[in-house]
Amino acid sequence: MKTLLSLTVVIAATVLGFPIFTRIARAGQPRDAGNPGAEPPSGKVEVATFAGGCFWGIQDRFDKIHGVLKTTAGYTGGTLKNPTYREVCSHATGHAEAVRVEFDPGVVSYARLLDAFWQMHDPTQKNRQGPDVGDNYRSAIFYHSPEQKAVAEASQKEVNAARFQGKVVTEIAPAAEFYPAEEYHQHYFKKQGILYPVCH
């Protein structure tokens, strides 16, 4: 039935003159528009952690990149163990709202994730993204290896020189303990049926 429906859509689109996409993402695997020739997952998994304002929007953006296997919204970079959302919002914990990204480096590179990160928020704002203000909304890259640190620093220099009139203030720091946020924060926009998030 699904095959017949797909064939009908293709025929109808062809007759009506709509463009036909030659590459269709596998169900449940968002296509990475910046990496159209990506191969199937290689089985390798690496971790990256980013903070750039409200983690709802950051998580939603990373979820759409082909090669990203899993994302988790949470808190990191502070001192309090097992913080709650309310505690992080009090600005007394030092934690940032962040997203832990598990990805297949054979499909999407860390550099490509950085490119997406720079585009999904304003790295010239130190402790603010849109209406969200405070150190918990800071722009930060938490690296998990010396290689990630080097790539992040090089990428930041390129962005600082080429893309923004203001100075990039994104913090680059070693990854610390990551605490997953409460379940209702995970994939928030998807749960709410929000297709076009506006917070980033």
Image (cartoon, rainbow, N blue to C red):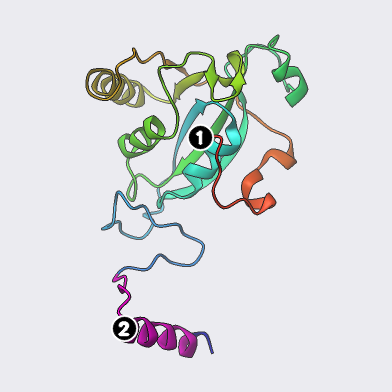
Is 178 displayed left or right of 105 in the figure? right
Is 192 displayed left or right of 139 in the figure? right
- Residue at (49, 38) in percent of width and height: 101
Is 193 displayed left or right of 37 in the figure? right
Q: Residue under circle 2?
A: 14
Disc 1 to disc 2, C-alpha distance: 36 Å
Check the image and report above or below for 193 versus 142.
Answer: below
Q: Is residue 34 visible?
A: yes
Q: Is residue 21 magenta?
A: yes
Check the image and report above or below for 23 versus 34.
Answer: below
Front position in the image: 70 or 135: 135
Q: Residue under circle 1?
A: 200
Answer with mark 1 or mark 2, whichever residue precedes in sequence.
2
For the stretch drawn in magenta, the main secondary structure is helix
Is 3 displayed left or right of 197 in the figure? left
Quadrant assignment, res 197: top right
Quadrant assignment, res 114: top left
Front position in the image: 53 or 147: 53
Residue stretch in magenta: 3-22
Quadrant assignment, res 12: bottom left
- Residue at (60, 37) in percent of width and height: 56
Front position in the image: 49 or 120: 120
